[in-house]
Image (tube, rainbow, N blue to C red):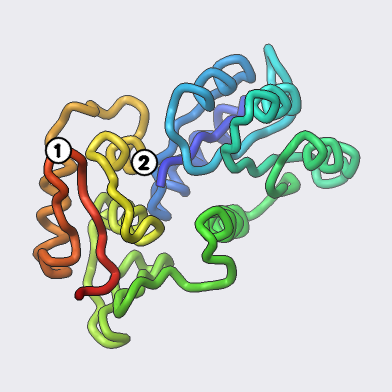
Amino acid sequence: MRLLLVEDDKELSLSLQKELAHNGFAVDIADNGVDAEFMGEEESYDIVILDLGLPKRSGLKVLTHWRNKSNKLPVIILTARDSWHERIDGFKAGADDYLGKPFHVEELVMRIRALLRRTHDMTGQPLQCGHFKLDEECQQLICNDQEALQLTGTEFRLLRYFMLNPGKVLSKTRLTEHVYEQDFDKDSNLIEVYIRRLRDKLGKEYIVTRRGQGYIFKDTLE
């Protein structure tokens, strides 16, 4: 899954980017409100982590502008822990969740996972499709509650996106946008390589090619 991290503290943003990447997320960074607003409108993100105290344009204004344009991008706002009024203003502007600073990265990761499930109607459920279960902590695929298959970082991000969207036709472009960072070459054929690797591990019948359209992840076989 692809995240936009909006934070003007360079040391914090680079640290969070590294930790989030370690937990299986592709992360782009914006350090001011103007760039963040543009990126949130032009790029395909699954979640935005938005600090409110930003240069050039406040995070609250960025969020308000997105919602006024009917941009439903899920947003977790970052606030000072004792700034309860910022949290209230953030929720009024359309935030989906908040986290007070300072915070533990583990809590942020859990909030991201929970929000992803809510946006895909999987609230309170493990990420499971048919007899496949994704262990997000260990980045492993568990088959039939027994065999655990090791996944590379890219395989994990790609499979997680497939499992959050079972039965949907997903184009190569859409998959690339949600698996890789902003500077990745979207015309690359690398995504096809990883789909082939997943087919080798799951069985080719679970990821079907729809010629001229994209791929479908089948959680059940007819």
Q: Is residue 188 left or right of residue 154?
A: left
Residue identifier under label 1: 212
**How many residues crowd mark 1 within 10 Å: few (<14), some (14–19), many (20+)?**
few
Tag 1: amino acid:
Gly
Mark 1: which secondary structure? loop
Pick the front one: 217 or 84? 217
Q: Residue at x 61, y 15 (%)?
A: 34
> Residue 73 shows which numbered tag?
none
Q: Position of residue 158 (x, y in %)?
A: 29, 52
Q: Looking at the image, is mark 1 or mark 2 earlier in the sequence? A: 2
> In front: 186, or 8?
186
Q: Which residue is mark 2?
A: 178
**Residue lying at 52% horizontally and 23% vertically, measured from the top left:** 41
Q: Position of residue 179 (x, y in %)?
A: 32, 43
Q: Position of residue 174 (x, y in %)?
A: 31, 38
Give the residue furthest to the right.
85
Residue appearing at x 25%, y 40% in the figure: 171
Kindly check if marks 1 and 2 are in contact, taking CB atoms under 8 A apart as contact: no
Crowding around mark 2 (Cα neighbors within 10 Å: few <14, some 14 to 19, many 20+) is many
Please tell me which residue is depicted at 23% across the width and 68% down the height of the picture. Answer: 150
Q: Which of the pair 15/94 is nearer the observer? A: 94
Q: Residue furthest top?
A: 56
Please state if 95 lies on the left or on the right of 190 as rendered. right
- Residue type at mark 2 is His
